[in-house]
Image (cartoon, helix red, strand yellow):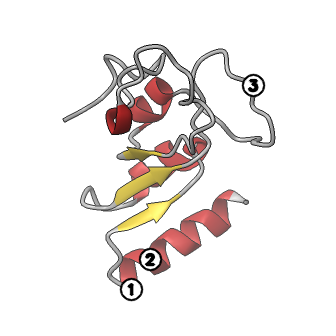
Amino acid sequence: MRARQVERLASLAVKAGLSGLVCSPLEVVALRQMLPSRMKLVTPGIRAPGDPAEDQKRTLSPSEALTAGADWLVMAGRSMPHRPGCRGESGAGVPGVRGAVRR
């Protein structure tokens, strides 16, 4: 999606009173610069380091997405199954998440 369209839709969401948005992890930095700090950002397209992108084109690692300013990460199970040490919902056992998880 083009940057202007993303910004326009984000502005409409703020005016409508929404408290969060789903966005590409590659849009997080720009959205953080223009949105009120209360706005939560949910980012699908999160891949553990070394995982193939498969059908996703705009991806970041968990650490990169959190550093960019994402509040919630969606890993859709692709990076989670059969990972040694994966501990459920926190994702702390997924490479790239441990140490980046904010409380």
**CA gap, disc 2 to disc 3?**
32 Å
Which residue is tagged 2? 13
- Indicate the position of residue 87 as horizontal and vertical percent values: 35, 26
In this rendering, position of residue 80 left or right of residue 40: right
**CA gap, disc 2 to disc 1?**
5 Å
Decide which of 71, 75 is in the foreground and name it: 75
| Residue at x 35%, y 18% (from the top left corner) | 98
Which residue is tagged 3? 52
Q: To which quarter of the image does residue 17 belong?
A: bottom left
**CA gap, disc 3 to disc 1?**
37 Å
Which element type, helix, strand or loop, lies under badge 1? loop
In this rendering, position of residue 29 left or right of residue 6: left
Which residue is tagged 1? 16
| Residue at x 48%, y 34% (from the top left corner) | 65
Q: Mark 3: which amino acid?
A: Pro
Disc number lying in front (3 or 1): 3
Which one is earlier in the sequence, the residue at label 3 or at label 1? 1
